[in-house]
Structures are given as C-alpha cells and as structure tokens.
Image (spheres, rainbow, N blue to C red):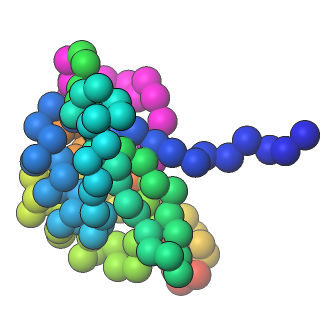
Amino acid sequence: MKMGKVVHFEIHVEDMEQAKKFYGDVFGWTFEDWSEYAGMPYFGAITGSKEEHGIDGALMQRQSPPPSAGQPLNGFACTMGVEDYDATEEKNLASGGTVALPKYALPGMAWQGYYNDSEGNLFGIHQTDENAK
C-alpha cells in the first residue's frame, strides 16, 4: 500500500483579494481563478515552478467565523520552507501578518517560527541552517 502524501491544501479566507496579495507578497505565490469549478470564490495557489514543484493548494471563501486569537489550532498548520527567514518574517509583518510563536532554533537543523496571516490563519516558516542554535 502506498503512503498517503499531501497533494493539496486549502486556506479559508474572508477577504480574497487581501489574502491573494498577502501570499503573493510574502511567498511569491500566484493564483488561478477556479471559482467556476468550486461554485464559490476559490483561487488555486501555485507555490512552485516547473523546475521545483511545490504542494499547490487554494484560497477558498471562509464559511464560518475566523479563528479567534489564542484559540487552539483545530486543523493543519502548513509550514513554508524559505531561503531567508528574517526577510520572510519582515514581509509577513509588513503585509498585515502577526507573530504567533517567535523564531526559534531547531539546533543543528533549522530556524522555525509560526505566524498568523492577514486573515488570522496560522502558518509556519522554516529555514534550513545547520548552524542554528
């Protein structure tokens, strides 16, 4: 039996244009309008290139209240691999995101931290660095 692997993600958002701008500015994602197929505002998120494919997903119209501050996570937290942690954090904060768990070292492996996007959704950023401590 083959192992199940993540092949698609969905981020629930209230303000679609704001969320597209946020993820485009912070991570360089591009979007395709798939609303016709979904029957609601639904934009495919392209997270990689043909040379370096990512796990693509979508921004979809939120159907319930957004997560409240301090609420325990009740879903999956996606973590994005980045080349420059500090520059990505700076773009996140400049684009309306907030810090959920500040940058910390995974000793000898990487830098990790968690943030809220402009819609209140939790995500992580991860920069590989053998010298992290």
Where in the figure is residue 2, as x and y percent of width and height? 84, 44
Name the foreground residue: 80 vs 98. Answer: 80
Residue furthest to the right: 1
Query: Can residue 16 be seen from the camera position used here?
Result: yes
Which image quadrant is residue 38 in?
top left
- In-image side of 34 versus 20 (left or right): right
- In-image side of 99 versus 84 (left or right): left
- In-image side of 122 versus 20 (left or right): right
Query: Can residue 70 be seen from the camera position used here?
Result: no
Residue at image coords 18%, 66%: 25
Residue at image coords 20%, 18%: 65
Residue at image coords 24%, 16%: 64
Where in the figure is residue 80, as x and y percent of width and height? 43, 60
How many numbered tags mark residues here? 0
Q: Which stretch appears magenta?
A: 65-78
Q: Tell me: residue 97, above or below residue 12.
A: below
Residue at image coords 29%, 54%: 32
Where in the figure is residue 61, as x and y percent of width and height? 23, 30
Q: Is residue 46 magenta?
A: no
Residue furthest to the front: 36
Secondary structure mostly seen in magenta is loop
Q: Is residue 69 magenta?
A: yes
Quadrant holding the N terminus: top right
